[in-house]
Image (cartoon, helix red, strand yellow):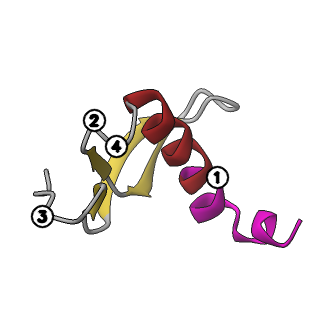
Amino acid sequence: AASIIKPGQACSLTISGVQKEFVIDAETNKPKIVDTTSVTLSCDHRLIDGAVGAEWLKWFKLYVEEPTMMLM
């Protein structure tokens, strides 16, 4: 999925719905089904460098997966 950056915006965040995905568990090496979602950040590179956008997405992922980290 992609998003359109409208005039006046520096970036736009798109979040897909939750989907079931088949993966191999790294600890047990056994298959399992997990819920996943896709997140896309579109940046106007005149305002936000791609590396800065990637760093923001890294922290966004952490906070979505571990919400209690926002309190620290």
Give the labeled residue for mark 2: 45
Task: Give the residue at mark 1.
Answer: 62
**Separation (CA) of disc 3 from disc 2:** 13 Å
Going by the numbered disc 4, the residue's amino acid type is Leu
Location of the C terminus by quadrant is: bottom right
Q: CA distance from mark 1 to mark 2?
A: 24 Å
Secondary structure, mark 3, is loop
Q: Are marks 4 and 2 in contact (CB under 8 Å)?
A: yes
| Residue matched to label 3 | 6
Q: Secondary structure at mark 1?
A: helix
Q: Residues within 10 Å of mark 2 (few under 14, many from 20)?
A: few
Density class for disc 4 (Cα within 10 Å; few <14, some 14-19, many ≥20) is few
Residue 48, percent from left and from top: 38, 41
The image's mark for residue 47 is: 4
The tag earlier along the polypeptide, 3 or 1, is: 3
Labels 4, 1: front one: 4
Q: CA distance from mark 3 to mark 1?
A: 27 Å
- Please tell me which residue is depicted at 15% across the width and 57% down the height of the picture: 5
